[in-house]
Image (spheres, grey):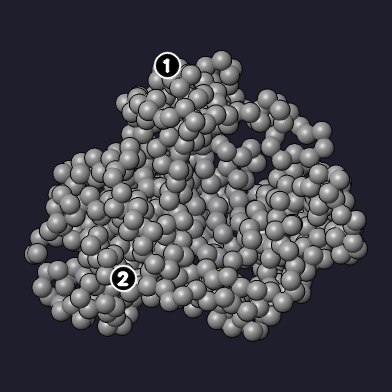
């Protein structure tokens, strides 16, 4: 294969508002090395096909064929308003693409779009609000017309996703598709069975799109990226379609899912779909693979690559330096097709779903690489490599020129403060006017002066891990920050006009009920003091690559190891000697946070967010409360954050 024509594909599903950046990086890199490289986003293409008039007609046929008892509220509502869906779908998609903003008036009137079960909360109260609740009109009062309409149109699309789920494929979702077939699945059997099943409407549509993309680009090497478990099924369906139609086309799989989950891959059936699976940063393995395909390198000299015949091969050549990895390019991606959605009314949350962001990294890896819940030994965290500010600025300039858009999302695991300072200074000196946001650690070098400099350079938001707001647990996690320090740093960002989102965690080893309640109290105070504006609580999961997974005894937990994994291996169940039932607290934590993000309930005792242990039982069956059933009172002084800020 002397003439290489390379096509990088984003399989469904990823994001609707912006392309997942992996193919942009690889295409930019390969072009910088002189290769004929192209890219395609089959995730957004699939959504547009399903949500077209023809797609809805096909969906209607599926709904009509359902036996009566299999109908759901979503399918009944769709069938009853089908004509209205057909007349509104194209204009609504154009509106969400930003091509027809005046349609906002009709959408916001709520007399234009058909409404299904997803609209129910609008008739009552915002889902999750406690006490008397707050009508959505209250929240909309703070929004402009465009945002109001965007939210209505997002609910309309969510209704349609529910119809696809109920009538075509129960695994369907706009951002995660058939995730359970891939996430920490020790064997390939479930995915194999799903891939052997006859095509449903979604599969058939994806196959048509795949073949059309093949015909357009005529590649002899196709790279498929699988960043998450939620697009692995799509990745294999794409590869299956390619291999059935053109078996001579070489297929390779890579991306974040492979890097974390497939490190012990020992499953020959995977190679019926992919000829190669690569691990970690793709540039060096790809160069080696291309040389191999050009007969310039034997197969046993590949880099971090699984092959059917030689299993795992790694001749350990050094990676391409971050500075040499080229400028990402979005060339070939349909940038005008992405949809700006508005799921959550919180201004920070919307950054993830609303608007198209150019994605860049300030550095490869994490400069801290110590947190005990993180994959600190894997390349994407452990290999810290920084390019000069000049290189970064050139990449920014190039992306602005190419896309005409000035919004940047720095998708680092934790962007280093020194590099951000230098970047901000350079942006200001060169009068390069961009808006940017990214992930950081809340470390003390972000003082008022630096935060103001970042804001002046266009920084609009930061995200960072506060995890469990408890100094004891932050220490056990080796997070390298304290609650009071986070309060001062986040306040400095907020004072500079930069929105702050905190990643929060519950269920960490040794975490007690008292820790959980105290953590929520800290979070309440941080919201009340205007330090943070947004957050998300996720349940701690132990990965096999993290220090907790490697040395569970240091964290007071015992792992339940699954049987030998031949396919995916990442999350691992564990038993915590503390014995706390964390399930009891999850819903209350999320409800509290949802309300705090809307500025509600900040004056309540945090215990009020948690249900009593026997809340689900009928009154006659409730048991006498034991002292251990009570949600503990917080031990955090009510003015702790205020004092830290003073
Ligand atoms: S959690 Fe974040 S800051 Fe901590 S090691 Fe991982 S990437 Fe770095």
Query: Residue 266's quadrant in the figure?
Result: bottom left
Regarding mark 1 in the picture, which secondary structure is present there? helix
Q: Earlier in the sequence, mark 2 or mark 1?
A: 1
Q: Which mark is residue 83?
A: 1
Q: Nearer the viewer, mark 2 or mark 1?
A: 2
Regarding mark 2 in the picture, which secondary structure is present there? loop
Towards the viewer: 460 or 122 = 122
Residue under the point 43% across and 51% down: 178
Task: Answer few, some or many: residues within 10 Å of disc 2's Cα (few below 14, many 20 plus, some between 14 and 19).
Answer: some
- The quadrant the C terminus occupies is bottom right
Ligand 1 under 8 Å from disc 1 Cβ: no
Q: Is residue 84 above or below residue 581?
A: above
| x and y, in percent, of residue 403 in the image | 37, 43
Q: Which mark is residue 327?
A: none
Q: For mark 2, what is the residue?
A: 267
Q: Is residue 318 left or right of residue 221?
A: right
Towards the viewer: 336 or 325 = 336
Towards the viewer: 357 or 46 = 46
Q: Is residue 120 above or below residue 384?
A: above
Q: Is residue 161 above or below residue 1?
A: above
Residue under the point 33% across and 28% down: 58
Residue under the point 48% across and 19% down: 80
| Farthest residue, direction left | 2
Towards the viewer: 305 or 246 = 246
Res 136 seen here: yes
| x and y, in percent, of residue 328 in the image | 35, 56
Query: Residue 64's quadrant in the figure?
Result: top left
Q: Is residue 299 above or below residue 448?
A: below
- The quadrant the N terminus occupies is bottom left
Instruction: Give the CA distance from mark 2 to mark 1.
Output: 48 Å
Task: Answer few, some or many: residues within 10 Å of disc 1's Cα (few below 14, many 20 plus, some between 14 and 19).
Answer: few
| x and y, in percent, of residue 476 in the image | 69, 77
């Amino acid at each position: 294969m002397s003439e290489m024509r390379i096509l990088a594909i984003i399989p469904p599903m990823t994001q609707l508002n912006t392309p997942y950046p992996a193919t942009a990086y690889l295409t930019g890199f390969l072009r910088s090395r002189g290769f004929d490289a192209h890219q395609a986003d089959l995730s957004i293409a699939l959504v547009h096909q399903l949500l077209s008039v023809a797609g809805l007609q096909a969906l209607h046929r599926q709904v009509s064929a359902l036996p009566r008892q299999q109908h759901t509220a979503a399918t009944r509502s769709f069938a009853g308003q089908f004509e209205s869906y057909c007349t509104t779908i194209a204009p609504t998609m154009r509106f969400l693409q930003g091509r027809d903003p005046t349609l906002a008036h009709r959408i916001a009137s709520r007399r234009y779009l058909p409404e299904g079960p997803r609209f129910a909360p609008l008739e009552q109260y915002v889902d999750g609000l406690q006490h008397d609740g707050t009508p959505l009109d209250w929240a909309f009062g703070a929004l402009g017309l465009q945002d109001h309409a965007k939210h209505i149109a997002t609910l309309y699309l969510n209704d349609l996703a529910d119809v696809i789920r109920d009538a075509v494929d129960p695994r369907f979702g706009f951002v995660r598709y058939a995730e359970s077939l891939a996430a920490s699945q020790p064997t390939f059997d479930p995915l194999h069975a799903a891939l052997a099943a006859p095509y449903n409407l979604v599969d058939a549509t994806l196959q048509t799109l795949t073949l059309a993309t093949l015909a357009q680009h005529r590649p002899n090497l196709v790279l498929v990226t699988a960043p998450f478990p939620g697009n692995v099924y799509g990745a294999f369906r794409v590869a299956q379609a390619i291999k059935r139609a053109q078996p001579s086309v070489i297929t390779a799989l890579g991306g974040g899912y492979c890097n974390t989950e497939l490190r012990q891959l020992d499953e020959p059936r995977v190679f019926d779909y992919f000829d190669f699976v690569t691990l970690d940063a793709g540039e060096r393995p790809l160069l080696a693979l291309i040389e191999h395909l050009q007969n310039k390198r034997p197969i046993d000299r590949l880099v971090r690559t699984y092959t059917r015949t030689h299993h795992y091969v790694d001749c350990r050549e050094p990676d391409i330096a971050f500075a040499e990895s080229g400028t990402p390019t979005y060339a070939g991606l349909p940038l005008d097709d992405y949809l700006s959605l508005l799921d959550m009314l919180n201004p920070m949350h919307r950054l993830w779903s609303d608007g198209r962001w150019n994605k860049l990294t300030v550095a490869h890896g994490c400069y801290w690489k110590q947190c005990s819940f993180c994959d600190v030994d894997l390349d994407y965290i452990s290999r810290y490599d920084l390019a000069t500010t000049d290189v970064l600025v050139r990449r920014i300039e190039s992306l602005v020129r190419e896309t005409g858009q000035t919004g940047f999302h720095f998708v680092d695991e934790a962007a280093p403060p020194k590099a951000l300072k230098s970047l901000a200074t350079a942006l200001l000196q060169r009068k390069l006017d961009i808006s940017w946001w990214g992930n950081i650690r809340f470390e003390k070098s972000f003082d008022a002066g630096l935060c103001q400099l970042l804001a002046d350079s266009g920084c609009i938001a930061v995200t960072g891990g506060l995890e469990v707001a408890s100094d004891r647990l932050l220490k056990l996690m080796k997070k390298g920050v304290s609650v009071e320090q986070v309060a001062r740093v986040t306040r400095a960002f907020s004072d500079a006009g930069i929105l702050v989102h905190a990643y929060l965690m519950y269920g960490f080893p040794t975490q007690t009920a008292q820790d959980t309640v105290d953590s929520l109290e800290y979070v309440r105070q941080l919201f009340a003091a205007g330090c943070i504006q947004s957050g998300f609580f996720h349940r701690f999961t132990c990965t096999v690559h993290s220090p907790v997974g490697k040395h569970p005894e240091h964290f007071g937990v015992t792992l339940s190891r699954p049987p030998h994994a031949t396919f995916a291996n990442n999350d691992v169940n564990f038993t915590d000697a503390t014995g706390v039932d964390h399930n009891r607290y999850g819903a209350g934590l999320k409800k509290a946070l949802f309300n705090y993000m809307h500025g509600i309930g900040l004056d309540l005792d945090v215990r009020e967010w948690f249900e009593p242990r026997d809340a689900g039982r009928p009154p006659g069956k409730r048991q006498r409360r034991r002292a251990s059933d009570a949600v503990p009172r917080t031990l955090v002084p009510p003015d702790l954050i205020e004092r830290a800020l003073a």
